[in-house]
Every structure is written in structure tokens, then in C-alpha cells.
Amino acid sequence: MKRRSFLKGAGAAGIAGAAVSGFPAPAISQNRMEWRLVTTWPKNFPGLGTGANLLADFITRGTEGRLTVKVFGGGEIVPAFESVDAVGAGTAEMGHGAPYYWKGKVAASQFIASMPFGLTAQEQNSWFQYGGGQELADEVYEKLGCKFFPSGNTGVQMGGWFNKEINSLEDYKGLKMRIPGLGGEVVKAAGGNVVNLPGAEIPPALQSGAIDATEWVGPYNDLAFGLYKSAKYYYYPGWHEPATVLDNFINIKAWEKLPSDIKAVVEAANTAVNQLVLSEFVARNNAALATLVDKHGVVLKKFPDPVLNGLGGLAGKVMNDLASGDPLSRKVMDSILTFRKGAIGWTTRSETAFTAARSLPFQYAEPSGG
Ligand code: CA
């Protein structure tokens, strides 16, 4: 694909024409590249697949087509979970997914994705941009043959869909649940039987009873998948994924060959997409949650504090054990733990204190007409 478009661009009107006339060929016929962006998401999936589309569009328009990016849904040209291999090997130039999907290849990637009981989305972005996170993530992705950019964030997810109530940690024993990343390791430690499935395979698995429970993202995405049709209880909060990062991974050689102005466009496009995806989740989750409850009769349940407390303790232990066996995971985890400590001091006195204040029972203004 890349070779063909290069040949097309360097045809008679390009290099040959320039050699004859002695003038450089017009920029429009030179150095035009077409990249393939492979994703782990179903094509155009709300918030995730559309985030990848947005990235491709920003880069294509921002470079006036000098770098045209074409998006492929999970399984279209490579299986969803092999996207990073395809990009690392140069079969595709670029990918979009979530870092924990690569934990079997580089364990530290799951710490980049989101730590159970770890950082909020704002804190996570601050860690990337001002806390050394970008450099550490690049070190992790280099092992996959890729350059890394944070390229979207889901914000706090939901705890998941269950067909039975979770009243104590004991209730996780034998529970067959789809839950990826470190959260999955914690559920495993609680006695659960954990499976990982790409998004598209979740609804049929829950419907057929192949799994008893699943988490996916939050109201907006879960409504789109129709998960309410196969499970009764919708638990919160998503302790396991408080701020899951979406990743844009780029073949490192292809990245290094890019001219610096195109590099700047790719970087700026990711910064924009990172913010836009989070904003979209926040805006659309509000309406989707109301639809799930009012229209589909979903029963919302908060995990009891003793369950959260138990899971939190298990999370610390599980992550410590995983990190101790792998120096790069340890390095990433230590950096996040240090950042988290400082963030707790500030967030407790800013966001947490403010949202508590906002929830006090005072009478407030209402939108006119509503
Ligand atoms: Ca999830």
C-alpha cells in the first residue's frame, strides 16, 4: 500500500518531470504517504473507534494529505489483539487500542493503562505530561517496536454487569468474568475465573452464559453493546479502571522517518484526541446512564465499602507481586505511586471536596423550563 502510493506519487509528473525541467517537482506529488491505522475496536465504535477516526482525520487534514491515515476496525486486516505486532513489524504503520492488551508481550504496559485504585483521568494526563509518564511509556513501547502517545481516556469506568449480587469478596469465588489488565489479576486473586475478550465478543459471551459477568467501559459504550439485555445488575464504581488510557502506537522506524512538521501534527492530533475522547465520554455517559435506568430498568448498585476495601488491598498486593518480577513494571509502578501520593493530597482538597460540597442538600437553581 505504502509502496504503491509512493510509486504513484513519483510517477511521470513527479521525479521524471523534475529531472527534465530542472525544477523541483511540486510538493503535492512528493513525499505523500498513506498509512494504515489498525485498531482493537469494532469499526466506528462510539468513543473508541470514533476516537481513532478522529485521529486519522486530524493527521490527514493537518498535513493536507501528505500523511493520509486510513482506519481499519479490529479484525479487518489483523486480529484485534495482534494490532501491536502488526505495527511493531511494520505491516501497518499505526495502531489504536489500550495498553493492557499488550501485557502478554510487555508486562509494564498494563501499569501504563490504568492502575486499579490508581489515578483519575486528569491525574493520569498530568502524569504523562508533567510527571515523566510520556518518557516511561516510550521506554515500554520501544520494546514493542513502537512510539507511544496517549490518545484518549475513558475516565472512571463502571464496575461491570453481574447476574448476581456482590455482597462480599466471597462472591467473586468461581465467578467467570471478562475483565482485562490489572483489574483482572485482582479478580483472579479474589478467586474469580478471569477471561479477556475483545469488545465485539463480549455481548454473545454474556448472552450465552459463557461468562457470568463482564465489565466493558461505561454507560455510553455498554448501552451501545446492549449488555443490559443479558445481565441484571450494573455495579459502580469502576475501581479497576479509574482512567483507562487509549494508546496510539506507531512503528518506531516509520515515526523516526517522519519530517519534523508532520511529527508535530501527529503529536498535536493525539493531544487533541486524548482530550476529546474523555470529553465525549463524560458528555454521553450522562444521558446513557439515564436511558439504561429509565428505559431498560437496569438496577444500579454500588460495591459495598468492605468489598472495595478488600479489592483495594488485593490490588496493592497483586501489583507489588507483578512489579517485583519485572524491573520495567517496577519502574513504571513506582513513578505512578509517587505521583498518586501527591495527587491524593491535592485532589482530596480540590475535586473530592468540591463534589462533596456540590452534593449537599441545598436548593439550587434549575434550568428554565426544566
Ligand atoms: Ca474496561
Image (spheres, rainbow, N blue to C red):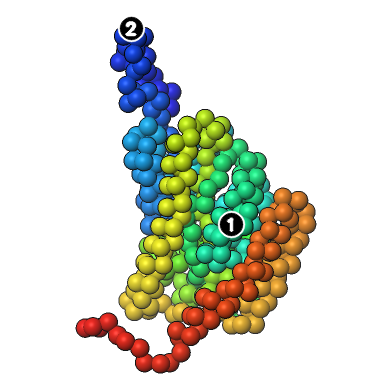
Residue 18's spot in the image, x, y percent?
34, 12
Q: Which mark is residue 130?
A: 1
Q: Amino acid at mark 1?
A: Tyr
SS for callout 1: helix
Q: Residue furthest bottom?
A: 362
The answer to whether residue 241 shows anywhere in this view is no
Of 238 and 330, which appears nearest the observer? Answer: 330
Q: Quadrant of residue 308?
A: bottom right
Residue 265's spot in the image, x, y percent?
43, 42
Mark 2 and mark 1: Cα distance apart in space: 52 Å
Q: Residues within 10 Å of mark 2 (few under 14, many from 20)?
A: few
Q: Quadrant of residue 129?
A: bottom right
Of 122 and 152, which appears nearest the observer? Answer: 122
59 shown above or below 226:
above
- According to the picture, the residue beneath numbered tag 2 turns out to be 20
Of 290 and 205, which appears nearest the observer? Answer: 290
The answer to whether residue 152 shows anywhere in this view is yes
- At 52% from the left edge and 35% from the top edge, which residue is drawn? 255
- At 42% from the left edge and 52% from the top edge, which residue is drawn? 272
Residue 166's spot in the image, x, y percent?
58, 79
Q: Residue furthest right?
A: 324
Q: Residue furthest top?
A: 20
Of 264 and 68, which appears nearest the observer? Answer: 264
Mark 2 vs 1, N-terminal side: 2
SS for callout 2: helix
